[in-house]
Amino acid sequence: MDMSFAMNTNDLFKTRLQVESFNKSIEKAGRNVTNTLGKDDFLKLLVVQLENQDPTKPLDDNEFISQMAQFSSLEQMTSINKTLSSLISNYKVTLSYSLLGKQVEVLDRATGEQNSGVVSEITFSGGRFEDEVPKISFNGLSYSVDDVVKVSMSRLD
């Protein structure tokens, strides 16, 4: 009597379909579910796979090493993504401060027109500059720093 519990491709596919079906039923109940497996899910699946492998046909070392390398690469890419996002946010803050007192032209996305003026104020509506795009103000109006199309030295009028 064969008591092998190793998951082959067919079993994995069927399990994935069941998980997706279960996730859809949860979503209908109003809960938020992601459709991706995380680090913990991967490690749990790996442990189950190792625990239930057939002793006469152990897991292929190359496959195991490949999966671990892919997982390690994914973790590193996620870390790099977070670091780059933080760097971009900090760059936008630095850029916005450098615009104080400068003549700028911005594209008003609502009207499609370009407006210009001397930047008099930088604002962060949420109070945390890491979480948002800074707003520059001139002539009583506020614009996203992303809308700046031209910067020049302030003209003395």
Image (cartoon, grey):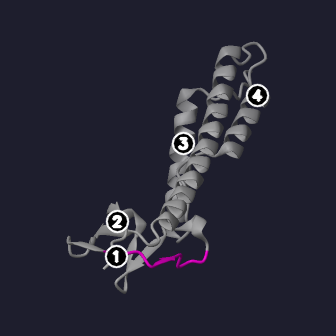
Region of the chain picked out in magenta, as a range: 117-127
- Going by the numbered disc 2, the residue's amino acid type is Asp
Marks 4 and 2, how far apart at CA? 54 Å
Numbered disc in front, either 2 or 3: 2
Other residues around mark 2 within 10 Å, as few (<14) / some (14–19) / many (≥20): some
Question: Measuring 54% from the left and 42% from the top, which residue is drawn there?
Answer: 16
Question: Measuring 55% from the left and 27% from the top, which residue is drawn there?
Answer: 9
Provide the residue designation for mark 2: 147
Provide the residue designation for mark 4: 50
Marks 3 and 4, how far apart at CA? 19 Å
Q: Position of residue 78 (x, y in %)?
A: 60, 44
Q: Is residue 116 left or right of residue 84?
A: left
N-terminal of the pair, mark 4 or mark 2, is 4
Other residues around mark 3 within 10 Å, as few (<14) / some (14–19) / many (≥20): few
- Going by the numbered disc 3, the residue's amino acid type is Arg
Question: Measuring 52% from the left and 36% from the top, which residue is drawn there?
Answer: 13
Between 128 and 99, the residue placed more toward the observer is: 99
